[in-house]
Amino acid sequence: MSPVVINSVFVAGSTLIALVILFHPRVVKKSVTWQATVTPLASIIGSGFLILAPSLKHEFGSWGIAVMALLCIAAYLFGNAIR
């Protein structure tokens, strides 16, 4: 298999796993704030990915995905510190 196919399968699989975990009925039903934050948070994250993904691909090449993952971890830790 080519690296492009492997990369695509990895991204699709990771996305599917994240969606299953985040939208599991237990998570959504128990959290009152979840429903209020999903739309704005999705908009912010989506905009960030649309802007950063091509830039990271251009600057870091095949390491762009790893850099995006590090940015996501940093954003999570920053958000956790604020909360």
Image (tube, rainbow, N blue to C red):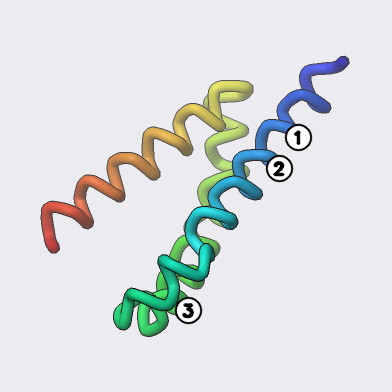
Viewer-closest of 4 and 19: 19
Disc sitting over residue 39 in the figure = 3
In the displayed image of the protein, which residue is found farthest to the right? 1
Q: Secondary structure at mark 3?
A: helix
Residue 33 in percent (x, y) is at 30, 79
Q: Quadrant of the N terminus?
A: top right
Contact flag, marks 3 and 2 (Cβ < 8 Å): no
Q: Residue at coordinates 18% horizontally, 54% vertically from top-left?
A: 80
Residue at x 54% of width, y 62% of height: 46
7 and 54: which one is in front?
A: 7
The answer to whether the residue labelled 2 contacts the one labelled 1, judged by CB atoms less than 8 Å apart, is yes
Residue hosting label 1: 8
Q: Amino acid at mark 2?
A: Ala
Q: Secondary structure at mark 2?
A: helix
**In the depicted structure, whether residue 66 falls above or below residue 12:** above
- Label 2 Cα crowd, 10 Å radius (few <14 / some 14-19 / many 20+): few
Decide which of tag 3 and tag 2 comes sooner along the chain: 2
Q: Position of residue 15 (x, y in %)?
A: 62, 47
The quadrant of the image that shows the C terminus is: bottom left
Identify the residue shown where x is 78% and y is 18%: 3
Answer with the quarter of the image where residue 79 lies.
bottom left
User: Of the residues shown, which amino acid type is indicated by label 3?
Assistant: Thr
**Mark 2 lies on residue:** 12
Q: Is residue 45 left or right of residue 12?
A: left
**Of the residues under marks 3 and 1, which one precedes in the sequence?**
1
Q: CA distance from mark 3 to mark 2?
A: 21 Å
Left or right: residue 35 compared with residue 6: left
